Amino acid sequence: MFFLGDLGIVHCINIDEKLESYGGLLDQYATSCELVNRPQNLLTIIEKNLRLLEIEPKKHTEKKGYHHENTIDETLDKVETELSLIEAKTTSFIEPLATYSKIIRKIDLLLTSWKINRKKFAVNGENYLKESPEDILNSAEKRLSEIEFRMKEIEVVSLRAPKILIEINKLVKKLKIKSSDFPTNGIKYSIDEKFLDFIELTLKNFEEKSQSKLSKFYNSKQLIKIKLTVEKILEKIPQERKNLVKQILKLRKFAELESQSIKKSPEYVLIQSKLLSLQNLLEEVEEIKKIESHLGSIASAVYLEAWVPNKDLKKVMDGIKELTKGNCIIKDELPEPEDTVPTIIKPVPRLFEAFKSLTFSFGYPKSDEINPVFIVALTFPFLFGIMFADVGQGLLLFVAGLVLSYFRRITNTEEVGDIIRYLLMGSGLIILCGISSMIFGFFFGNFFGPTGILHPTSLATIGPFEIGGFDPIFDPVKMLRLSIFIGVGVLSLSLILRIINKIRNNQSIQTLVSVCWLWLLLGGFAMWVYWGGISNLAKWFGEGLFMFLALVILPLMIMTIASSLIKGVMEGIQFSISTLIESLDHTISFGRLAALALTHGALNYMFLILGGAPHSFTWVTILMITVGTILALTIEALIIFVHTLRLHWVEWLPGFYSGKGIPFKPIKFNNKSMEYYEYGS
């Protein structure tokens, strides 16, 4: 299995579902209990060391790494040996890292309790450079306790001092003392509770001792000095608090720098790389175990079925023979008709990755089906642009898509939230939808609504159908006709792709049925265009009877007969009737293009009217246009996106795309993920 994983071109098949078909000759492959638990136990040890060393589990892509042995047992023995050597070297790193982390956590808790944002303070750990890390570690707890005690004391002082100042002001008022008659210097003070206790005790005796003029003068002078001192204390408290915060942040910064210094040391980096490499190696073992649990066995032989691309078949067969020294039997079989052959999904350019996700959310293509990702990249923006036709708003979508595309290139999508990731990956879709909206905005003459800045531009006129040259909100009938015309065109494309699929699979009768379906769709559409709709239905069976028989009844009859040859008479009739109803239903469903285009235009028009347009164009008009644009780019754009997706998933894709394929997922090991740096000799 290691050999197949290194090749990365073999898709293993689950044998569990086929065991019964072998009549008891084939058993499920069983692994020993020791082999089941051993890799997981080693992974637990590695994860513990990674946690203690504060290493994030991530892939490494350097130049030299561990490689698996020939068997799982040999590989696990190698991992155990290497892990023992690594663990012997981790002790010198684990204890200091744990201490620094403890200091940082405690400081963060203190800052949180004090409601202080440390990002507002610019500090460094230079003050601690004169001391050795060992001395700082030993005294860190004491320093933190002293700072915490001092901060609590300052908080108490900040609460008591204002109350004392109120009492002083009452005495000053009662004794009728004028501050201007005395010096403005205070007394020596300290910002602590003992000093406030001394002041409170002094104030209690002031009124009693102020009977004589001399003592009154002396006490009044002292009272003013105390007042000035308390005021200075209140002024100094914020700075004192700030100094304490800086002290604690400097200690935190030092702990951070020392922790980073340890993590940058060559020996630490080597240990980190080796642990991650061993972790990746064990994950490969776990993957092999999962695959082996779905293999079969006959006596002491292992039975394996797998899909291999034709061009790589010889390489795989020769490799297995060489590895087993010829002790194997390999049979090359072509897939049976009932087999679901895995589909090799090729990567798409970043511009189209959103369309790939939307298409494959419906299901993966079978190997004998057309992969419609690139076709969806054309039809999706096309339909979206019809419903969101506006040059100004389309331009905003286009710019937003470009901005998201820029951030998509510089951002690792695995490190952001789901909503941000979807927006970044959908940048290409937003760009193309914006372009389509601008194009149809020109055709319908909309620039942030029917402002009159642009006039509708006609692209073409095909019979009763006008492509552009009118505003949907003023000519809804023309818009409805255009929607039906586009719907028939999109459904016809679906049936053409269906015919191509059937021809590629040499399904002649199914091809005939699909051709008749397309004949029926276009024939019914031609009848509607030539004779009119329901109001003129009598003409279909009168003047247009022969046309009706040739364009509708004849393909329906041929479809019924051809379907009956495959499924039986009743099933053939049922299929033909359901096809007729489905064609009508899906065609009418495209009327939502007109409905949403009218809604979009009406919303913009409403805000223009509220802003006073077209009679005046003031700041109120600009404000209303802005509000309407915000609503259009958020709520309405999302609604139109959902309806566009619905047209693809319900009306278009099912016509030719089953979505019942399985992707080709070979067992594959990325050797680069097991690499690490080597320092020294």
Image (cartoon, rainbow, N blue to C red):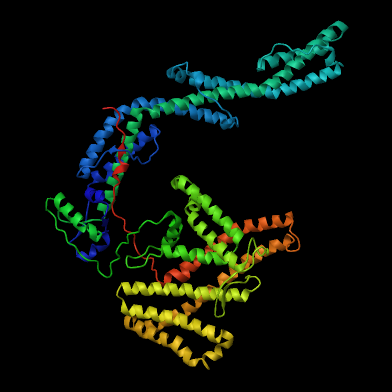
Image quadrant occupied by the C terminus: top left
Is there any visible trace of residue 216 in the rendered image?
yes
**Residue for point 50% across, 66% down:** 646
In this view, the residue in front, 561 or 434, is 434
402 horizontally vs 606: left or right: left
**Residue 212 visible within the image:** no
Front residue (pair 289, 356): 356
Placement of 9 over or under 119, stated as above or below: below
Q: Name the one closer to the observer, 49 or 539.
A: 539
**Residue at 32% in and 74% down:** 503
Q: Tell me residue 37's x, y (percent).
A: 28, 43
Question: Quadrant of the rendered structure where residue 56 is?
Answer: top left
Above or below 294: residue 181: above
- Asked if residue 302 lies left or right of residue 218, the reply is left
Question: Could you say which is closer to the camera, residue 243 or residue 174?
Answer: 243
Expressed as whole percent of the image width and height from the top left, the position of residue 285 reads 27, 45
Q: Is residue 670 left or right of residue 452?
A: left
Residue 21, position in %: x, y?
22, 66
